[in-house]
Image (cartoon, grey):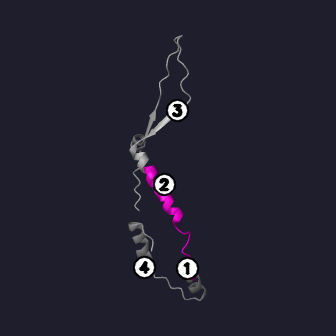
Amino acid sequence: MEVIIPPSNATSVSKTYKTVVKPASQSGDGQPAVADAADSVALSSDAKAALSITKAAAAKARTLPDTRDKLVESLQEEIRNGQYQPDHVKTAANMLSELITGEQR
């Protein structure tokens, strides 16, 4: 799943949120009547899309394990035995790959 976050600036924020205001009606004595107590806000299609992406990402995150238990146990054992020798080039390549593809190895 790819998450695209639009650039943050005042223009995109103003396009994202649209405020709807109800005008107060006039009472019989010429004074403005009390407006309805309920205010409302309408979300633009960009805001609705961002909300949908956020909900999907949160749902996906809840299904992932906190750690890769078997890998962690294996690495801890190698460290205890003095056998752990990380491949720095492979580690860097995997980090870049995860960053680009979004997939964890």
Q: Picture coordinates of residue 94 (x, y %)?
A: 42, 74
Report the amino acid beneath label 2: Lys
Tell me the residue that label 4 is attached to. 90
Q: Picture coordinates of residue 53 (x, y %)?
A: 44, 54
Tell me the residue that label 2 is attached to. 55
Q: Picture coordinates of residue 103 (x, y %)?
A: 42, 69
Element at label 1: helix
Q: Which residues are magenta?
A: 50-73
Q: Quadrant of the N terminus?
A: bottom left
Element at label 3: loop
| In the depicted structure, whether residue 11 falls above or below residue 88 | above
Q: Picture coordinates of residue 41 (x, y %)?
A: 48, 37
Label 1 vs label 4: CA separation? 20 Å
Report the amino acid beneath label 3: Asp
Element at label 4: helix
In primary-sequence order, the first of circles 1 and 3 is 3
Tell me the residue that label 3 is attached to. 39
Label 3 vs label 4: CA separation? 56 Å
Mark 2 and 4 residues: CB-CB less than 8 Å, in contact?
no
Disc 1 versus disc 4: nearer the observer: 1
Q: Nearer the viewer, residue 34 or 80?
A: 34
Mark 1 and 2 residues: CB-CB less than 8 Å, in contact?
no
Q: Nearer the viewer, residue 81 or 59?
A: 59
Report the amino acid beneath label 4: Lys
